[in-house]
């Protein structure tokens, strides 16, 4: 969807605006949750803000347009100051994807209301923008739930591993090799056109779409 939008000038602006909104909300939510759990690192570094410039990562943004995958600037926090240990870190991580799901839900509401009132899918530029916004947020949420560092899903994986008494050294090793493994997965997927990532994400995307009700607007 993202790469296709680049070939349609009328939706390129919608894509850029949606991308900025999605990343900003995502990273702000990380900072907000970290602050709620007792760590003010993000707040002191100016990340507890809805200013997009504080959250956009140059490489992550460029990769979104080049290969359809990317990220925002990671929100720093001090684990020693976060309440509830690994569980607190997991809450910080999940705050990002959850915020994107909620944003997609709100953006899909006009389409759902229109469908109920008119028994037809909505058309027009406003609904095209909302469709792009919903789709991007659903995908961003699902992608970030992949349990590979540094994606948000890795924090859930760490909590599970700790519950199974996996050694801390193993978790630290995963943190070190995770970013490289993720980039290799992304570029291999794009280079050989395997669609492996989309195949892995399809069940998660389907669940989020069901919750959001995105089938009521034209994707």
Image: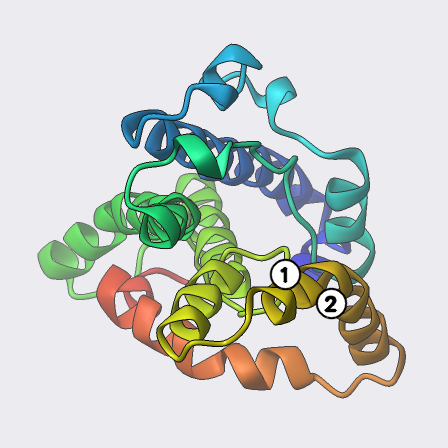
Q: Where is residue 19 in the image (x, y as percent from the top left)?
A: 58, 40
* Residue at the image position 41 percent from the left and 47 percent from the top: 89
Asked whether the beta carbons under mark 2 and mark 1 sit within 8 Å of each other, the answer is yes
Q: Name the residue under label 2.
A: 182
Label 1, residues with CA under 10 Å away: few <14, some 14-19, many ≥20: many
Q: Position of residue 145 (x, y in %)?
A: 48, 64
Q: Is residue 183 found left or right of 169 in the rendered image?
A: right
Please say if 38 is above or below 60: above
Quarter where residue 96 is shown: top left
Q: Is residue 79 found left or right of 109 in the rendered image?
A: right
Residue furthest to the left in view is 117
* 15, 24: nearer the viewer: 24
**Mark 1: which secondary structure?**
loop
State which quarter of the image contains the N terminus: bottom right
Q: Position of residue 16 (x, y in %)?
A: 64, 37
Mark sitting on residue 149: 1
Residue furthest to the right in view is 191
Number of dots carrying numbers: 2
* Residue at the image position 32 percent from the left and 63 percent from the top: 214
Q: Distance between the residues labelled 2 and 1?
A: 8 Å
Please say if 36 is above or below 154: above
* 218, 185: nearer the viewer: 185
Sequence-wise, the earlier of marks 2 and 1 is: 1
**Mark 2: which secondary structure?**
helix
């Amino acid at each position: 969807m993202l790469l296709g939008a680049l070939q349609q000038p009328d939706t390129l602006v919608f894509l850029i605006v949606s991308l900025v909104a999605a990343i900003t909300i995502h990273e702000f939510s990380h900072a907000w949750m970290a602050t709620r759990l007792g760590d003010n690192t993000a707040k002191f570094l100016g990340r507890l803000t809805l200013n997009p410039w504080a959250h956009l990562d140059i490489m992550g943004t460029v990769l979104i347009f080049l290969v359809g995958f990317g990220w925002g600037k990671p929100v720093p926090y001090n684990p020693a100051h976060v309440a509830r240990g690994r569980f607190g870190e997991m809450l910080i991580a999940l705050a990002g994807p959850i915020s994107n799901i909620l944003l997609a839900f709100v953006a899909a509401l006009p389409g759902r209301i229109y469908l109920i009132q008119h028994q037809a899918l909505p058309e027009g530029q406003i609904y095209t923008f909302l469709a792009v916004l919903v789709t991007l947020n659903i995908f961003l949420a699902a992608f970030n739930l992949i349990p590979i560092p540094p994606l948000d899903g890795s924090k859930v994986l760490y909590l599970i591993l700790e519950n199974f008494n996996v050694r801390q050294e193993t978790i630290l090793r995963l943190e070190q090799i995770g970013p490289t493994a993720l980039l290799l997965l992304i570029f291999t997927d794009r280079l050989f056109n395997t669609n492996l990532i989309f195949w892995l994400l399809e069940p998660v995307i389907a669940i989020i779409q069901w919750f959001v009700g995105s089938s009521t607007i034209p994707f």
